[in-house]
Image: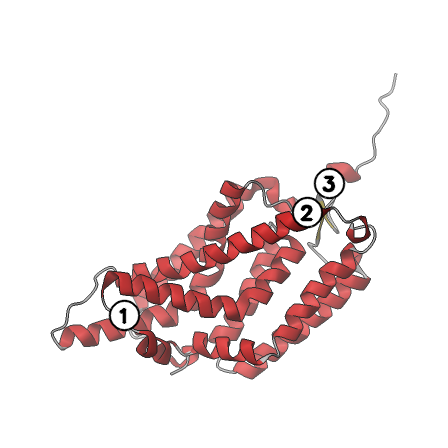
Amino acid sequence: MSAASVPVRSGRLPTVLVLLAVAALCWVVVVQLMGGAHERDDPGALGFFVGIWVLMMAAMMLPSVWPTVLVYQRLQAARRERGEHGVPMGPCLLVVGYLAAWTAAGLVGFAILQVGRSMQVDALSWDRGGPLLTGGVIVAAAVYQLTPLKDVCLRHCRGPFSFLLEHWRPGSLGAARMGVRHGVWCIGCCWALMASLFALGIMSIPWMVVIATFIGAEKLLPWRRTATGAVTVALLVLGIAVALVPERVPWLMTPSGGMHGTTTPEMVPEMEMPT
């Protein structure tokens, strides 16, 4: 059973609505907390980044994880009908484990970003090789879309029924462990897309929306190969554009502290006051 074929019965609709409501709330909080931070590429201190990252993952990923939560609820209901013990907070623990896996992935990304910044290689500064490096990361993400590993991970994400049957663990701890394992498969599926987000600007709300749309399309649309192919082409075109004509790429963050196509205080020339 694929994610696209999971039916949303009336009894399960509240679960989907709750997940979407939580995701929407996280979007609102992220925008509010970032404030002017979305106009720069600096992820801030570790504590700030972790908090924002967890909210970002909830906002971006919860809209596409609902099929797994629904199948988990269905399997729990079947176990209760057989007289077995259920886990009342199981769906919540599943989601918590899932977000914990993505939090660990975010910490790895933060560490890589900080190491790259500390090296300060002049040849890779934005005025020199920066656009090529950024575009290369996005093109590499497009190439990863075509690999067998991506295909295997995406099939696990789109097949929640088979995934949960294969990795089922009882109890509260089991629910959290299944969430972590599902998150690991999801990271294997989406890490390159998240790397593209880091390259484009981790604090960019518009690019967060774009990447979240790519992820949702790949996981939820019934036409898996078409969705993956469309995302691959989009990444390839975007990567080439960033490498060759970065000034034409909207919302692209630069290390100077702004986006192309926007006006920042650094871009406004000083005016002499009349005497």
Q: Earlier in the sequence, mark 1 or mark 2?
A: 2
Q: Residues within 10 Å of mark 3 (few under 14, many from 20)?
A: some
User: What's the amino acid at mark 1?
Assistant: Arg
Q: Is residue 101 left or right of residue 127?
A: left
In the image, what residue occupies the spot 71% across and 43% down?
257
Asked if residue 108 is positioned above or below residue 69 in the image, the reply reads: above
User: What's the amino acid at mark 3?
Assistant: Thr
Q: Secondary structure at mark 1?
A: loop
The residue that mark 3 highlights is 264
Q: Which mark is residue 117?
A: 2
Q: Secondary structure at mark 3?
A: loop
Residue in front for this viewpoint, 67 or 116 = 116
Q: Percent x, y for residue 55?
A: 46, 51
User: What's the amino acid at mark 2?
Assistant: Arg
Q: Is disc 2 in contact with disc 3, using a CB cutoff of under 8 Å?
A: no
Q: Which mark is residue 231?
A: none
Q: Is residue 260 left or right of residue 96?
A: right
In the image, what residue occupies the spot 30% across and 71% down?
72
Q: Earlier in the sequence, mark 2 or mark 3?
A: 2
Q: Percent x, y for residue 116?
A: 67, 51
Q: Is residue 162 left or right of residue 212?
A: left
Res. 7 in view: no
The residue that mark 1 highlights is 169
Q: Percent x, y for residue 78?
A: 20, 77
In the image, what residue occupies the spot 81% across and 63% down?
244
- Real-space CA distance between mark 2 and mark 3, rounded to the nearest whole angstrom: 22 Å
- Real-space CA distance between mark 1 and mark 2, rounded to the nearest whole angstrom: 42 Å
Q: Quadrant of residue 70?
A: bottom left
